[in-house]
Image: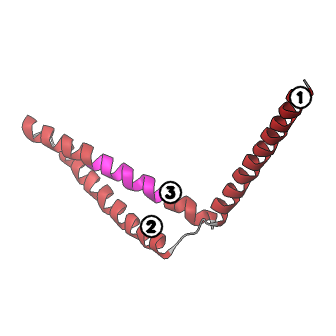
Amino acid sequence: MTFDILIHNVIKDLNTEIKKEKKSDKIDLTLNVEDSVKFSFKDKKEHKSLERQINKLELEKKEMENFFKKSNNSYELMHEKSKELENLNNLLDGKLNRWMELEELKNKV
């Protein structure tokens, strides 16, 4: 009976040590990730490029919206342009999301 108790205690101690090591590993990983956050030259370049692209896409969007204000357009043309507008909005959303990610990264540094 004492051998079983000894083994049980050893296993319990090992499990406790493993849990402590896992906790310390998690802490180290989060510190390393926070320390490695940098706004690189590539990020700066992409940020500027996205600003220009977003401005162009917003101008295109305004032009398309003006197209829809004209009441003399055919149904087929309006349908085609609405698909183009949807694609444009999706593209614009993607670029805006990436720009916001880079903006947050820029402000962290």
Residue at 85% in and 38% down: 10
* Numbered label attached to residue 5: 1
* Numbered label attached to residue 100: none
Q: Is residue 2 something one can see in this rendering?
A: yes
Answer with left or right where residue 101 lies relative to residue 90: right
Q: Is residue 70 magenta?
A: no
Q: Secondary structure at mark 1?
A: helix
Answer with left or right where residue 73 lies relative to residue 100: left
- The answer to whether marks 3 and 1 mark residues whose Cβ atoms lie closer than 8 Å is no
* Numbered label attached to residue 101: 3
Q: Position of residue 80 (x, y in %)?
A: 13, 42
Q: Nearer the viewer, residue 107 or 41?
A: 41
Q: Is residue 73 something one can see in this rendering?
A: no
Q: Secondary structure at mark 2?
A: helix
Q: Position of residue 50 (x, y in %)?
A: 39, 64
Q: Nearer the viewer, residue 58 or 2?
A: 2
Residue 6 in which image quadrant? top right
Quarter occupied by the N terminus: top right
Label 3 or label 1, whichever lies nearer to me, is: 1
The numbered mark, 3 or 1, whose residue comes first in the sequence reads: 1
Q: Secondary structure at mark 3?
A: helix
Measured in 3D between alpha carbons, the distance from the residue under mark 3 to the one under mark 1, in whole angstroms, is 55 Å
Residue topped by disc 2: 47
Amino acid bearing label 3: Glu
Magenta stretch, residue numbers: 88-101
Amino acid bearing label 1: Ile
Answer with left or right where residue 87 lies relative to residue 31: left
Q: Position of residue 100 (x, y in %)?
A: 49, 56
Amino acid bearing label 2: His
Measured in 3D between alpha carbons, the distance from the residue under mark 3 to the one under mark 2, in whole angstroms, is 9 Å
The image shows residue 9, relative to residue 30, as above or below, that is: above
Q: Nearer the viewer, residue 24 or 51?
A: 24
